[in-house]
Image: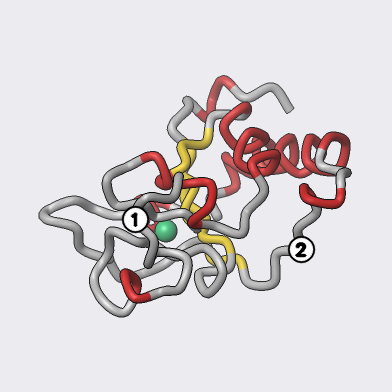
Amino acid sequence: VHEKIVPALRCVERRIQKTCKDSDERYTARAVGGFRHDNSYRGGEVSNHLFGIAVDIDPDRNPCCGCVEPWPSHKLCKDTSKSIYEKTELPRCWINAFERYGFYWLGRDDLEDTMHFEFLGDPDRILP
Ligand SMILES: [Zn+2]
């Protein structure tokens, strides 16, 4: 990721360690992706991964239900009546921790990209 968002990620990590302790809030991330060279197109938009300010956590466990196949066929996407929190293995406590420190969770978007968080704050205003 971009060095400027590292302090924000550290805050998220500390928050998770401090607050996500219940058995249903524990989660161990196995595969975390950040910076990418190639754009993942969504219309004409440029992915925030190109700027190193987006992270994806465990795509196999946190699907993007609104993306192209094979995502909508993921077992967690099948039941469209479910809430977005049931379409991801990420605990709500983790999502709250990211959002608290300026990361937007793309699970809230029409895309329902539950693996994806991007930093939308002003990195120059982060106090290390
Ligand atoms: Zn992503």
Give the side of residue 106 with respect to residue 3, left or right. Answer: left
Residue 96: x and y in percent read 63, 33
Quadrant of the image for the C terminus?
top right
Secondary element type, mark 2 = loop
Find the residue positioned furthest to the bottom.
70
Q: Residue at x 46, y 37 (%)?
A: 104
Question: What whole-number distance in Å separates the C-alpha atoms at marks 1 and 2?
Answer: 26 Å
In the image: residue 45, left or right of residue 21 = left
Residue 80, label in figure = 1
The image position of residue 57, as x and y in percent, is 57, 61
The vertical placement of 78 against 100, above or below, is below
Q: Left or right: where does residue 18 sit relative to residue 42?
A: right
| Ligand 1 falls in quadrant | bottom left
Circle 2 residues within 10 Å: few <14, some 14–19, many ≥20: few
Q: Out of 19 and 43, give the one closest to the viewer.
A: 19
- In the rendered structure, the answer to whether residue 61 lies left or right of residue 7 reads left
Kind of residue at badge 2 = Thr
Rendering quarter of residue 14: top right
The image shows residue 39 at horizontal and vertical percentages of 27, 65
| Number of other residues with Cα within 10 Å of mark 1, as a class: few under 14, some 14 to 19, many 20 or more | few
User: For mark 2, what is the residue?
Assistant: 28
Relative vertical location of residue 96 with respect to residue 24 in this rendering, above or below: above
Q: Could you tell me residue 119's position as x and y percent?
A: 48, 38
Q: How is the image coloured?
A: secondary structure
| Residue at image point 78% right, 41% down | 16
